[in-house]
Image: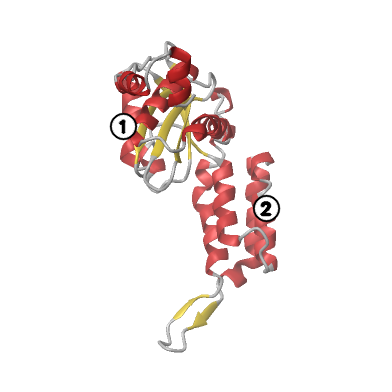
Amino acid sequence: MTLSELSSKYRKSVSTIQRRLSLMRRVHVVSKHKDVTVQMDTTYWGRNFGLMVIRDAVRGKILWHKYVRHETVADYLEGVDWLEKNDFTVYGIVCDGLRGLFQALSRYPVQMCQVHQQRIVRTYLTQNPELEASRELLALSRRLTVSEKDAFMEALSTWNRKWSWFLSERSVEKATGKTHFTHKTLRSAYLSLKRNMPYLWTYQDYPNLGIPNTNNALEGTFTDIKSKLRAHSGIKKANRIRFLDEYISRHYY
């Protein structure tokens, strides 16, 4: 509801409604379920306002959240440390490929969101690549979420054996005489898959932990929150935070 609608419904002036809203304070309810597998990610409104969330992957509850300008490894570790200090036992973590995050969370089984990996490959190769090698790698990445570990790794190795000569091609800069890899984006897409491979199959390596292979459920939570806030897109940052705190508290704690 808008301020004017609240004013009409409760027969209070707009200024009174604003004053009472400004007195709202966040109440953080700690979940009673302490054995968790968690999903973590950040969503943004514009460039400098993000909502970082750690979510119980089984129960769908938000365990911890923070407002950030940009996501950092230190912020995620702050959330994990909060879980530990509040007696949570974390059996596994699903996250994206933020540089340094896998190493920082190495004491846990870590699953990289396979959809994030697909997006990384698509960003490098585009939706409709011209090169045959790129089209084949893109098609292979699209099977990531429905493949078995051994089958996918064998398919990627087969692709590499077929196209390794192509990945190694180099071009010469006429101005400087220096050489560089000719197919940089294709090479980057392949190396991204190869580098993240140890974290793409954790959910299959630990089948008893119930680790999801994607963050799709968390993305759904973000979509729900954003749809509710969209009606108030013009509100100030402080009121946006109050709205988010209240909505998360009522629906996701």
How crowded is the residue under tag 2: few (<14 C-alpha within 10 Å), some, or many (20+)? some
Q: Is residue 91 visible?
A: no
Q: Which residue is nearer to you in this view: 221 or 47?
A: 47
Q: Do labels 1 and 2 touch, CB within 8 Å?
A: no
The quadrant in which the C terminus is found is: top left
Q: Which residue is nearer to you in this view: 189 or 11?
A: 11
| Rendered residue at 53%/31% (across/down) | 218
Q: Which residue is nearer to you in this view: 18 or 242?
A: 18
| Rendered residue at 54%/40% (across/down) | 113
Where 62 falls versus 222 (above or below)? above
Residue 147: where, in percent of width, then height? 68, 41
Quarter of the image holding residue 114?
A: top right
Secondary structure of the residue carrying tag 2 is: helix
Residue projecting furthest to the top: 32
How crowded is the residue under tag 1: few (<14 C-alpha within 10 Å), some, or many (20+)? few
Residue 101: where, in percent of width, then height? 39, 42
Reading the image, the residue beneath label 1 is 78
Q: CA distance from mark 1 to mark 2?
A: 36 Å
Q: State which tag comes first along the sequence, 1 or 2.
A: 1
Please state which amino acid type lies under the numbered disc 2: Leu
The image shows a total of numbered marks equal to: 2
Residue 222: where, in percent of width, then height? 51, 33
Instruction: Give residue 211's mark.
Output: none
Reading the image, the residue beneath label 2 is 140
Which callout, 1 or 2, points to the residue nearer the camera? 1
Q: Is residue 105 visible?
A: yes
Q: Which residue is nearer to you in this view: 234 or 179?
A: 234
Secondary structure of the residue carrying tag 1 is: helix
Name the side, left or right, on which 26 lies relative to 234. Answer: left
Please state which amino acid type lies under the numbered disc 1: Glu
Name the side, left or right, on which 142 lies relative to 173. Answer: right
